[in-house]
Amino acid sequence: MKAPAVRDSGAPSLRRVDDYFVGTFMAMASPCELLLDTDDWDDARAALERVHGEAARIEATFSRYLDGNVVHRINHSAGRPVEVDAETASLIDYAATCWEASGGLFDITSGALRRVWKFDGGDRVPSHEALAATLRNVGWHRVTWHSPVLTLPAGMEIDLGGIGKEYAVDRAASLVAAGTRAPFLVNFGGDLFASGARRGGATWSVGIDDPEHTGAAALYRIDFDRGGLATSGDARRYVMWQGRRLGHILDPRTGWPVSGAPRSITVLATTCVEAGTLSTLAYLQGAAARDFLDGQGVRFWIL
Amino acid sequence: MQLDSAPRPAPVRARLRAAACLLLASSIPGARAAAAATTQFDASGLLYGELDRAKVVEPTLRVMRLLDNGQSFSAGLVLDAITGASPSGAMPTGRAMTTTSASGTVTNHAPGEIPTSPFSDFRGALELGWHQPLGGIVATDLVTHYSREKDYQSIGGTAALSLDLMQRLTSVTVGGGYDYDNVFPVNGVPVGLSPVVAGTGGPPDEGPTNASAVTAAAATGGTSAAVKQVPSAVVGVSRILTRRWMVSLNASRIVQRGYLTEPYKIVSVIDPDSGTTVGSITEQRPTTRDRRDLLANSVYHFGTGVFYSSYRYYWDDWGVRSHTIDLKYRRDLAEETFFQPHVRLYAQTAADFFRFGVVQGEPLPTYASSDYRLGPLRSVTLGGTYGFHVPDYPGELTVRAEYILQWGDGHPSDAVGVQRTLDLMPPLHIATVMVGYTRTF
């Protein structure tokens, strides 16, 4: 949900690889995968349809690039209260908790800042005035949220992209689990969830790309059997300023990119939502990312 | 940026994990299959000990089934095994003495000691509950219970209706209940304020089976059982003030009617000059008690903890007024680990008919009780709960330990003779330990 969606590219494809099935499709501008450890084609087909359906539903419901959905309604409410459905309310509740837990670093209203920064590898930074003007339209504290009614001041906008993909992974995983006993792994563009050890007890192996050379051989491998895994990083989108390289993740309190953060942070947690939030929060801590994760009791990998 | 020199960030994972669970558990249209029903199982064991007095062992089991339409059913079983001694109501005399209780027990006491009677009892209680949402903003709760012990039985139920108003920021609850209790005192229902004669010995409290062996007791008036009926009503309102703060106010009224006397409690008869006890009589309480209370609650969420505070004011037409302040702070330490210290302060005034004894020769009052629970009582509770999760095992464990100091004004202004030199309500030291286990399927 980070760029105009590469819309549904037709039916998902399913193929057999060794002793498991791999289903693939595009959603949320990302390649999406389901690995299902079974010998039953029908089982795999049914699971893939559920995963694909759920990814498409969540993208359609929460993408800020699509007209007419709830996010569009909120972002075009011009300061009027908007009553939202239960699912949206629980996502907003979650975002509000993240905002509180991170001391304001994680903020679903920070999207407006991206319009004044150009992360094209160049050296332009926004003027002080432009940044100050934009910051007036950023900040969850300006929003009135009494579930299920959200009142967003005119000029502000929300973006659930920071949790949407991870949420889609967990939702899809629970749908697969409800329909099959086979071990499986859901991977939406690098945010993933594995349901448990593979048949025969082997773990799942996930390769982590070198952030500098995406697509090249995996830099290292993570073996795990159960949980959500998510990665935050900024390798390809940056701006150079006073000789420093600033990544594209912005601190909503200052409007400036977070500095000193590692290139890539991968976290393994109970769910993909939790892993994604922790890796994002760690990234937002900048140079203190490792300290932050050390205290959380999770496995993590920093590059 | 300043972040580089910031103090080490606090762990937030426990909070995020709870929030993520909530997010992923919420029922979502079109994805019903995944919003699976859950079953919560709770088991706990409580040990309660008063220094030199009663000991209680209380195991409990509770199962709650939550369906995906918001309905829930619960069943709970509580067992109590009580042994030890409880104050009979008799006063200390300054000399060695013997007392008896209406159940025929005879015990001996050291000088100055508060006389107690040994007892043992076993109680079993069963509770069934049903929660049913009606539409989006109304819900009903029905609960029924049955409990039984050697000489007491209670059956009853409550019904409540709650209504969410103002975008669910405010919730109003109205409820009522009714209990029907039967008392079967071991030797029949004693006549109130009648003399209790010391026995000549015999085995201690063996219950109804050896009733024929009891050598002395108060006159029973020929009835073996008595009835207590207890209608109740409650109204409450709770309000979410901010994202972090919720407050509630509840008012309840309970009217007890019937046999409210404690059949085994006695009142000492004291010599008007020396203050020594010369005998004892059974106690007698009114047959109605109109009890009311107001309870104010506040729950405030901090980043890493929750502060619970409550104040209760209670009053009844027996003249008992009490104040209770209860404070708890839950501090999340790490994932699924928390510590919760607890402080409780309690003070009550005595019932109008509470007396440490009656003076021989003076006219008998209509009602009299020396039950310390109706006396000028104070207590302080200090304790803590630690909750944790054993890696690789499901469920959450909690361990709670509390110390309670209970005392009263044991130097009444109307004490006579030797009673003036004694503390009639000496401090009582109580300790409780509870271990609990919760698991969700």
Image: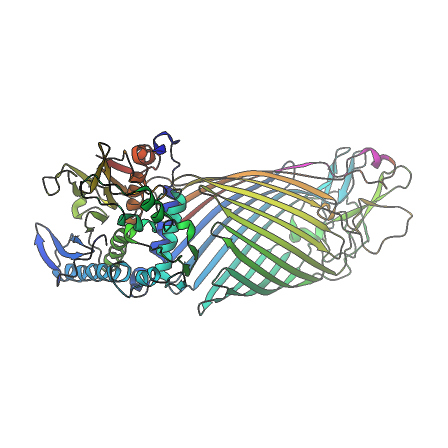
Q: Position of residue A25 (x, y in %)?
A: 14, 57
Quick check: is B290 in the magenta stretch? Answer: no
Q: Is residue B311 above or below residue B406?
A: below
Question: Can residue A250 be seen here?
Answer: yes
Q: Position of residue A219 (x, y in %)?
A: 14, 36
Q: Is residue B303 above or below residue B63?
A: above
Residues rendered magenta in the picture: B418-430
Closest to the observer: A26 or B408?
A26
Total count of labels: 0
Along the horizontal axis of the image, is B423 left or right of A148?
right
Along the horizontal axis of the image, is A275 left or right of B275?
left
Question: Can residue B103 be seen here?
Answer: no
Q: Position of residue A10 (x, y in %)?
A: 12, 63
- Name the residue rendered at 29%, 44% in the picture: A275
For this orientation, the residue located farthest to the bottom is B135
> On the image, which quarter does residue A48 sit in?
bottom left
Closest to the observer: B341 or B153?
B341
